[in-house]
Amino acid sequence: MNQENLTCKACGSTTFAKGEVNAVDARVMPIGKSFTFGSPVIYTFCKRCGEVASIKITKPEKF
């Protein structure tokens, strides 16, 4: 997702940031697969109102 072309659907702002959840198990895990580390998740969100524009799995090959 190209941040330069984003416009917030909630407030119209064009200023966005990226971040990830900082917790022990803040990873997306495959359903029904044991012994996998899963993948971290990156959020792209509006800096004015916090609306999330994108959620991206950083390591899709884990699935």
Image (cartoon, rainbow, N blue to C red):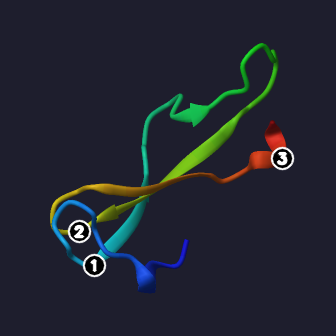
Residue 26, given in percent of the width and then of the height, sits at: 51, 34
Q: How far across and down, in percent of the image, does residue 58 sit?
A: 66, 53
> What's the amino acid at mark 2?
Lys
Q: Position of residue 10 (x, y in %)?
A: 20, 60
Q: Secondary structure at mark 3?
A: helix
Q: Are marks 3 and 1 in contact (CB under 8 Å)?
A: no
Q: Residue, x 27% and y 63% (percent of image)? A: 9
Q: Residue at x 45, y 78 (%)?
A: 3
Q: How many numbered discs sit on the rendered protein?
A: 3
Q: Is residue 20 above or below residue 16?
A: above
For the point 21% across and 76% down, the residue is: 13
Residue labelled with disc 3:
61
Q: Which residue is at the front of the view, 6 or 57? A: 6
The C terminus appears in which quarter of the rendering?
top right
Rendered residue at 73%/32% (across/down): 37
For label 3, the crowd category at 10 Å Cα-Cα, with few meaning under 14, some 14 to 19 and many 20 or more, is few
Circle 2 packing at 10 Å, graded few (<14), some (14-19), many (20+), is some
Looking at the rendered structure, the kind of residue marked 3 is Glu
Could you say where residue 20 lies in the image, as x and y percent from the top left?
45, 51
Amino acid type at image mark 1: Thr
SS for tag 1?
loop
Q: CA distance from mark 2 to mark 3?
A: 30 Å
Check residue 47 in the rendering and tell me which mark sits there, or answer none: 2
Question: Of label 2 and label 3, which has the lower sequence position?
Answer: 2
Q: Quadrant of the N terminus?
A: bottom right
Q: Choose the circle earlier in sequence order: 2 or 1.
A: 1
Q: Vertically, is 34 above or below 13?
A: above
Q: Are marks 2 and 1 in contact (CB under 8 Å)?
A: yes
Alpha carbon of mark 3 to alpha carbon of mark 1: how far? 30 Å
- The numbered disc on residue 15 is 1
Q: Quadrant of residue 50?
A: bottom left
Label 2 element class: loop
